[in-house]
Amino acid sequence: MSRDEIESVELRATVLCTPQARASKKEKLAELAQLKAKPTEGKRVPVPMADGGTSQEDLGMFWRKIRPNLGPEPSRATTKLSDEEKKPLLQIAWVQEDAAGMTEARAAQT
């Protein structure tokens, strides 16, 4: 291997091993509030970050983790939300529909 090839391999290894910046919960919540429909799990979308960059995030997975906060059993949520964090989400039509569906499903079980 030539010196240039070695430097190229080292550079690629550095880039691939460098941890990518991740969006905060606040930034993900702000992006969810902009969506017109429920996010799809497994699909990564760019989320603007406070430092001016963007992070590729799976908002569908994030929604799955916070969704129980808005239903009848908030203790089941993986990622907890404060009342202040819930307020803007509860103004969104698709969130209201999903929350109502959770409440109906829970009522049907009892």
Image (tube, rainbow, N blue to C red):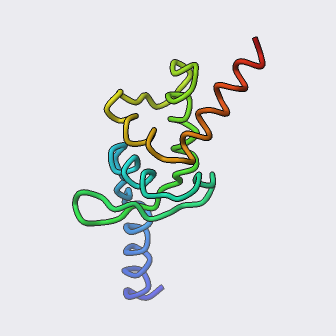
x 56%, y 21%: residue: 76
73 vs 53: above or below = above
Q: Residue at x 59, y 51 (%)?
A: 38
Q: Nearer the viewer, residue 25 or 94?
A: 94
Residue 10, how many percent across, how many down? 39, 73
* Residue 14, quarter of picture: bottom left
Residue 41 or 84: which is nearer the viewer?
84
- Please say if 69 is above or below 94: above
Is residue 11 found left or right of 42 in the rendered image? left
Q: Residue furthest top?
A: 110
Which of these two is toward me, 9 or 16? 16
Tally of numbered tags: 0
- Please determine whether, in this image, residue 47 is positioned above or below residue 79: below
- Residue depicted at x 43% and y 68%: 13
Front one among 106 and 19: 106
Residue 110: x and y in percent read 75, 11
Image location of residue 62, percent across then percent down: 51, 44
Q: Quadrant of residue 106?
A: top right
Describe residue 40's horizontal placement relative to residue 11 as left or right: right
Q: Residue at x 48, y 47 (%)?
A: 92
Q: Position of residue 102 (x, y in %)?
A: 65, 29
Residue at the left extreme of this rendering: 51
